[in-house]
Image (cartoon, rainbow, N blue to C red):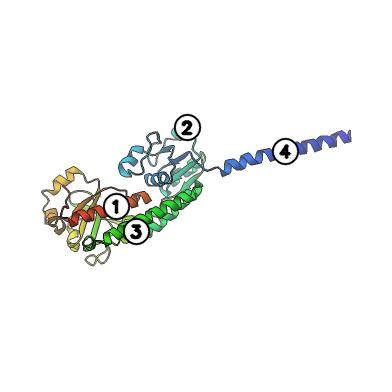
Amino acid sequence: MKRVALNRRRWLATALAMTAGLAAPSVFAAQSAAPRRIVTMNWELTETLLALGVAPVGTSLPNWYRTTIVQPPLPQGVADIGLLYQPNFDVLRMLHPDLFVITVEHAPAKPSLERLAPTITLGTYMSNPAPYAALCAETAELATRLQLPARAAALIGAAQRTADAVRARIGARPALTAAPVIVADLVDDRHLRVYGQGSLFDAMLTKLGVVNAVNPPAGGRVWATQVGAAMVPLQRLVDVQQASLLLVGPVAAPVVAQLGSNEIWQALPAVRSKRVAKLPVIAPYGGLVSMQRFAHAIDDALTLIAAGGGGVA
């Protein structure tokens, strides 16, 4: 009987060892597989995901991405998971995600999200004092999580080559860089949101060899806040009369109509000299695709102004 019991114990031990050996590879494979059913909860991070060649299965308010980020295009089949900070958890469960991509602003929802899938927090580059370098680092971090590091290297390299090429084109025409520029959103007919130090737009202007007029000293006063942008009244442009004004799209038609009767606007040197140009819709805190689009848009805008065709009409 002792021999039978001993043999039985040996058989059970062998069976358990074999079972563990068979199960281990499948568990390891599950842990090491690259996530592909990804849900993004920020439009700028959605851009970076798409630029790495991966489309999310769901994102917050997809149509807002299409109007505020534009490129790369978001496939039509991407599910709408609800509001930016109030996702629909029933939809999330049905999507069976294997990764959530969120920002620090989503911290209250993170514990609930992590019960459904692993979660990565990105987007801190938007408030980093050196945002471009931080954006490149986060692009590489996301690509590493996706097991696609070569794609991040290619994207970062393409952005640098674009900046170098545009800088060379602009530099070959000194008239384009003879005056500094202001890059701004036209908030209404009396206010601008200007982008200065700490913004991605400012970082790209530096790469392109274009002087940003809002950086100190600008009339002896600092314009930009710690997050790279500041709201200013139109009359502040008097401090930098030599600057050309580049307005990031969309520029609302009703606001343009109001500018026609705005005496402050009409008196601005940039307006009188036709040194105003509209840029396409470009996300100020977008990814490396947005920054490449910005570089090309700056080239086009300065070329237009140099030819005397600037204006917002």
Please name the residue that numbered disc 1 is placed on: 296
Q: CA distance from mark 2 to mark 4?
A: 35 Å
Q: Disc 1 or 3, which lies upstream in sequence?
A: 3
Residue 164: numbered disc = 3
Q: CA distance from mark 4 to mark 3?
A: 59 Å
Secondary structure at numbered mark 4: helix
Expressed as whole percent of the image width and height from the top left, the position of residue 256 reads 16, 46
Amino acid on which the number 2 mark rests in the picture:
Met
Left or right, 299 with reference to 5: left
Amino acid on which the number 4 mark rests in the picture:
Met
Q: CA distance from mark 2 to mark 1?
A: 41 Å
Of badges 2 and 1, nearer the viewer stands: 1
Q: Residues within 10 Å of mark 3 (few under 14, many from 20)?
A: some
Q: CA distance from mark 4 to mark 1?
A: 61 Å
Left or right, 93 with reference to 306: right
Q: Disc 2 or 1, which lies upstream in sequence?
A: 2
Q: Residues within 10 Å of mark 1 (few under 14, many from 20)?
A: some
